[in-house]
Amino acid sequence: MSQPSGPTAKVLFRVAEDDGSANVETLWAYDLGDDRYRLDNSPFYAYSVSVGDVVLAPVDPDEGRPTFQEVLEKSGNRTVRVILDPPLANGNSSDEVVQELISLGCSYEGANPGYLCIVIPQESDFSLVCERLTARNIQWEHADPDYSDLYPDDV
């Protein structure tokens, strides 16, 4: 069965905050049937999911849309999020960072020119990408896997 030409649904994610509240993020996805969805964009706030992952997301009657419950199948993609200063623009120092990440096999999606999700495919060196971001003093965070998955003894 072939996928439709574009994503067909938005899957709702509730992202817990430290104060006990939750923010809502929706990600474009392909409806695979049986409450399964393949994510078609990167999470700017949700953790432990990446573009291409298949998730279980039954329709929540209160929300009226598919709502994330669990990851069923990992795509192999990993995600880190970066805050760029200065914001990304052709030829500036942030563009140099992004071009270096692209040369390492990564792609990106931007919420705005200063806040990007970097997608690290399975065949790219995750540790090297993280080392390069750190060496350049870029503000960044682990999103998938998240920090607690990578360093459970530090949490």
Image: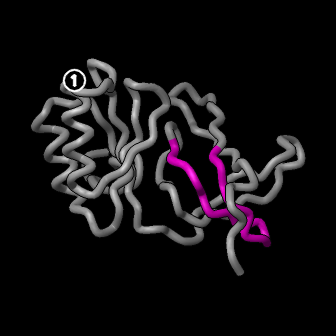
Quarter holding the N terminus is bottom right
Q: Quadrant of residue 33?
A: bottom right
Q: Is residue 23 above or below residue 73?
A: above
Which residue is found at the position 21% from the left and 50% from the top?
129
Quarter holding the C terminus is top left
Tell me the magenta residue range: 27-43
Residue 33 inside the magenta-drawn segment:
yes
Colour pattern of the rendering: one colour
Task: Label 1, secondary structure: give it.
Answer: loop
* Residue ranking furthest to the front: 90
Identify residue for label 1.
92
Which residue is found at the position 41% from the left and 41% from the top?
117
Of residues 98 and 44, the one nearer the viewer is: 98
| Residue 76 at x, y percent in the picture | 41, 68
| Residue 131 at x, y percent in the picture | 14, 47
Amino acid marked by disc 1: Asn
Which residue is found at the position 57% from the left and 37% from the top?
16
Residue 74 inside the magenta-drawn segment:
no
The overriding secondary structure of the stretch rendered in magenta is strand
* Residue ranking furthest to the top: 86
Q: Using residue 17 as the reference point, say whether residue 69 is left or right of it.
A: right
Q: Using residue 78 as the reference point, say whether residue 63 is left or right of it.
A: right
| Residue 91 at x, y percent in the picture | 22, 27
Q: Using residue 110 as the reference point, say whether residue 130 is left or right of it.
A: left
